[in-house]
Image (tube, grey):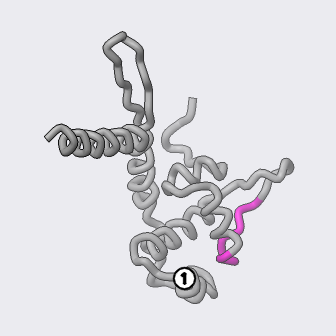
């Protein structure tokens, strides 16, 4: 059993993707674009992110996604490490908690039961897309029958 007071030392790219609500390929792209982000690799060659990497990712996430800065702008800001004015962001673990909640909310499953008692389970995103399609069809058929 994990003790809640003991922080985790290493995170996989899958865990980091879920924490920051980013696709794994985006995290790998950021590694190529930002020299400051260099997670270690274990003996098997698997990326292992540390708290230092999470600090960098918090700043990247805020600058790129929330402040809409370009990669070039962020690269320049972080050229010599995390500037002092961004330390509060780097140390704010609520950032990934906020994005992890968004990720979990989007991934919730929706279960539909048909008239013949068949059960269909969809991700929330797929269910929302299906609802949009149904609304569109309803509009089309409403126009046709009028």
The residue shown at (35%, 24%) is 112
Q: Nearer the viewer, residue 106 or 60?
A: 106
The residue shown at (53%, 87%) is 73
Q: Is residue 35 magenta?
A: yes
Q: x and y percent of residue 37 in the render? A: 66, 70
Q: Nearer the viewer, residue 14 or 5?
A: 14
Please give the range of residues in magenta.
Answer: 33-40
**Residue 62 shown left or right of residue 28 in the figure:** left
- Which secondary structure dominates the residues rendered in magenta? loop
Quadrant location of the C terminus?
top left
Q: Is residue 105 magenta?
A: no
Q: Secondary structure at mark 1?
A: helix
**Residue 88 shown left or right of residue 71 in the figure:** left
Circle 1 is placed at which residue position? 74
Q: x and y percent of residue 56 in the render? A: 57, 70
Q: Quadrant of residue 23?
A: bottom right
Is residue 113 shown above or below 110?
A: above
Q: x and y percent of residue 45 in the render? A: 82, 53
């Amino acid at each position: 059993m994990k003790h809640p007071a003991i922080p985790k030392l290493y995170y996989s790219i899958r865990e980091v993707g879920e924490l920051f609500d980013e696709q794994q390929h985006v995290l790998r792209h950021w590694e190529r674009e930002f020299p400051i982000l260099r997670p270690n690799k274990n003996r098997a060659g698997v990326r292992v992110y540390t708290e230092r990497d999470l600090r960098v990712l918090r700043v990247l996430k805020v600058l790129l996604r929330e402040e809409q800065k370009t990669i070039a702008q962020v690269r320049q800001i972080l050229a010599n490490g995390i500037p002092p004015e961004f330390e509060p962001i780097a140390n704010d673990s609520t950032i990934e908690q906020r994005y992890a909640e968004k990720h979990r909310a989007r991934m919730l499953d929706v279960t539909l039961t048909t008239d013949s008692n068949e059960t269909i389970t969809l991700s929330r995103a797929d269910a929302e897309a299906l609802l949009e399609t149904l609304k569109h069809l309803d509009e089309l058929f409403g126009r046709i029958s009028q």
